[in-house]
Structure formats: C-alpha cells, structure tokens
Image (tube, grey):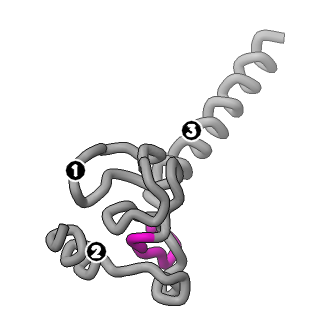
Amino acid sequence: MNTRLIASSALASVLAMGALSASAQSPAEGREKEKCYGIAKAGTNDCANLSGSHSCAGQAKNAMAADEWNYVAKGSCVKMGGKSEDEAKALVAKK
C-alpha cells in the first residue's frame, strides 16, 4: 500500500511540474506573437505600459490607450488597428 501511495505521489509531482513549466513560458515562446499597442481594453493589458504608470497586467485605466499593449498573432496587429512599439513610443512622446 505504501508503494502505491509513493508511486501515485511521484506521478502527481511529475505532472504538476510539467504543468508549471509549460505555464512559465512567455506568451511569445513556441508561437509567433508580437506586442500590439493601442488595442488593449481597460483592465486587459498584458503587462507594463510604455509611460511607466504601472508595471502589471490588467492595470490599464483607459481603453485603447497608445501606451498599453496585448500580445497578438504576428502580422495581425495592423489589421486590428494597433501600432508597433516604435509607433506607440512616438505617440506617447507627443503627449
């Protein structure tokens, strides 16, 4: 009985470690993604903004702010009306 419990615990540990390592990858790893600025809705940005007013995901105060971004499939940003990082920096610098 102890052998079965130990084997089950070991298997559960291995599976949990695999799930953790898969979730620790950045969104761009393994998939072609790019940052797309100016498309994030309020509270849905993926990380820190260009202006430095916050450093975490989900803290965008305004929808479609030029300095907020989301990861999108590579090549789809322009189709969504978004901007590249350089374009977003230029817009933020004008303000």
- Secondary structure of residue under mark 3: helix
Q: What residue type is labelled 2?
A: Ala
Q: Magenta includes 35?
A: yes
Position of residue 1 relative to residue 94, above or below, is: above
Residue tagged 2: 88
The residue that mark 3 highlights is 17
Q: Residue 52 carries which label?
A: 1
Residue 17, percent from left and from top = 56, 38
Q: Choose top left, top right, bottom left or bottom right for residue 35.
A: bottom left
Q: Which mark is residue 39?
A: none
Residue kind at label 3, given as amino acid type: Met
The answer to whether marks 2 and 3 mark residues whose Cβ atoms lie closer than 8 Å is: no
Instruction: Please say if the residues under marks 1 and 3 sit with CB atoms less than 8 Å apart.
Output: no
- Magenta stretch, residue numbers: 28-38
At x 70%, y 31%, the residue is 12
Which amino acid, mark 1? Gly
- Residue 10, position as x, y percentages in the image: 66, 28
Q: Name the quadrant containing residue 56.
A: top left
